[in-house]
Amino acid sequence: MFDTRTLIAITIDGGGTLASILASATNGINVNAGSSDTVILRNLSINGAGTTLGLNGINFLAGKRLIVENCTIENFSQNAISIAPSNASSTTISNSSLKASAFGIAVSSANASGSISVLVSNSSTYQNNNAGLSVTVPSGKPGVGVFVDHLNSQFNNTGLLASGTGAIVSLGNSVIQGNGNGVYQTGGSSVSSFKNNEISNNGNDGTPLAGISLN
């Protein structure tokens, strides 16, 4: 069992063993790295010990690049993964399960000095009280580009939520089903679809504003 800690330019790989973090009343991992640093988190189980206890599973505060691979993160009162860095950055989340929290993945440029890019692939967000994936750009803040490929977002309040001008999401090969709201866009945000998604059986499916032509 790892202690909760702040990580700077490091790889933590729990492959080959049971590597877990129990984070009651705190964040599981704070990533507060230098502007040229990459942090890699791989093969970890991070548990907030109940949605009224743990805060964020992974809390990305600063760094050039965050890579999350093959992780299960659940039971947090705020976000399974919070991406709100103070600098321009990129995040990759792959082969991971983000569940039973307030938000599965929450991306915001509220604190950022530059644009943020995020890739989510081959992952699932489900049974979160709010959104499985939330992308927010407050007024006057840098833009956020999120590229989604093979995401299963199910049984959340909202499958995919985009808010604010400059919040741009490209969605492909994904399943958004069984949520209160499927795709919800507000405040000038844009969700574009490759037209190969399954968005159905939600209380309100919603429709991506634009389609992307495949050449």
Image (cartoon, rainbow, N blue to C red):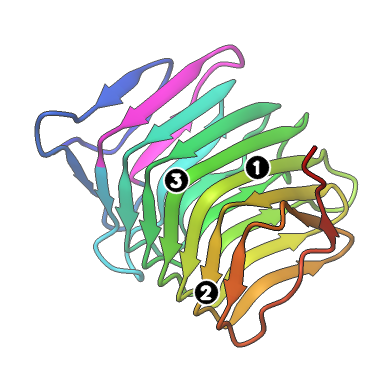
Write down the quadrant of residue 205 in the picture: bottom right
Q: Quadrant of residue 128?
A: bottom left
Q: Position of residue 120 (x, y in %)?
A: 54, 43
Gap in angstroms between the C-alphas marked 3 and 1: 12 Å
Quadrant placement of the N terminus: top left
Residue 117 x/y as whole percent: 68, 34
Question: In the image, is residue 28 above or below residue 98?
Answer: above
Crowd class of label 2 (few under 14; some 14 to 19; many from 20; radius 10 Å): many
Q: Is residue 39 magenta?
A: yes
Can you tell which mark lies on residue 177?
2
In the image: residue 69, left or right of residue 190: left
Q: Secondary structure at mark 1?
A: strand
**Dot placed on the residue nearer the N-terminal end, 2 or 1:** 1
Amino acid tagged 3:
Asn
Amino acid type indicated by mark 1: Phe
Specify the segment rendered in magenta: 28-44
Q: Look at the numbered disc 2 and give the secondary structure of its residue.
A: strand
Q: Which residue is mark 1?
A: 147
In the image, taking residue 144 as reference, residue 13 lies left or right, namely left
Asked if 121 appears above or below 185 in the picture, the reply is above
Q: Residue under circle 3?
A: 122
x and y percent of residue 47 in the render?
26, 54
Query: For the residue carrying disc 1, how many other residues have a C-alpha within 10 Å: few (<14), some (14-19), or many (20+)?
Result: some
Closer to us: 89 or 206: 206
The amino acid type found where label 2 is placed reads Gln
Q: Can I make out residue 9 in this image?
A: yes
Mark 3, other Cα within 10 Å: few <14 / some 14–19 / many ≥20: some
